[in-house]
Amino acid sequence: MRTQPAIQIAWAQSSQEKASASALLSALMGQDNAYISHSEIQWGLSEDGQSWAERAQADLHTYFVQFLEEGGQMALALDGEGALLAAAAVQWNTHTPTRFAIVQDLIVAPSARSLGVGASLMHFIEQEAKARQMAWVFLESGVRNHRAHAFFAHAGYGPVSHSFAKRLK
């Protein structure tokens, strides 16, 4: 049985940390069509909802840069030597009657999966959400991302809606 590595969880502060997190998210998400959900379609990263668009890898990076410029944050999980193990893009919403956080995307490096790294990252995000007096943490996942669904269900998350889409062109 593999054991959880010594990890440090923190918010990305420097430009280099943010770029590293964006690169990890972009590279790993872009390798797996299961990560495609309605937001990837909305951003033009997938034209059919089944596969990534030709320029998705570059456009994913642009998406995360813009996300950070608009006030989003990146939570990072680093190993004992400072190597990036996981990253999550988090948005805070305080402009509605119900305050909530959205975990837009979360990725764990394949070598660190099933070691508790993702759970530690989610716990960190939830603690920050509580400190910010958020009532909810929302996330979305591609319909075919069964591994993520199991992970989120194990962490206490459950479905509250279904997204439906119809392609018109």
Image (cartoon, helix red, strand yellow):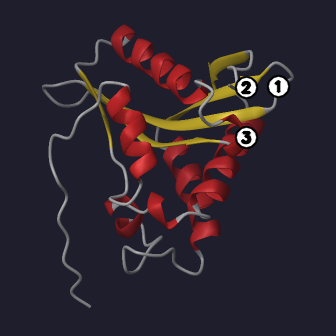
- Label 3 or label 2, whichever lies nearer to me, is 3
Circle 3 is placed at which residue position? 111
- Asked whether the residues under the numbered discs 2 and 1 touch, taking CB atoms below 8 Å apart as contact, a structural biologist would say yes
Instruction: Give the residue drawn at x 67%, y 58%.
Output: 27
Residue located farthest toward the bottom when viewing the structure as drawn = 169
Pick the residue in front: 119 or 61.
119
Q: Secondary structure at mark 3?
A: helix
Q: Amino acid at mark 2?
A: Leu
Q: Position of residue 113 (x, y in %)?
A: 62, 37
Q: Secondary structure at mark 2?
A: strand
Q: Position of residue 60 (x, y in %)?
A: 57, 61
Q: Position of residue 73 (x, y in %)?
A: 52, 33
Residue 82 is marked as: 1
Pick the residue in front: 79 or 65.
79
When the figure is inspected, residue 74 is found, relative to residue 110, above or below; the finding is above
User: Badge 2, how many Cα within 10 Å: few under 14, some, many 20+?
Assistant: some
Q: Quadrant of residue 96?
A: top left
Circle 2 is placed at which residue position? 78
User: Badge 1, how many Cα within 10 Å: few under 14, some, many 20+?
Assistant: few
Q: Secondary structure at mark 1?
A: loop
User: Badge 3, how many Cα within 10 Å: few under 14, some, many 20+?
Assistant: few
Q: Left or right: 111 with respect to 143?
A: right
In the rendered image, the quadrant that contains the C terminus is bottom left
**Is residue 72 something that shows in the picture?**
no
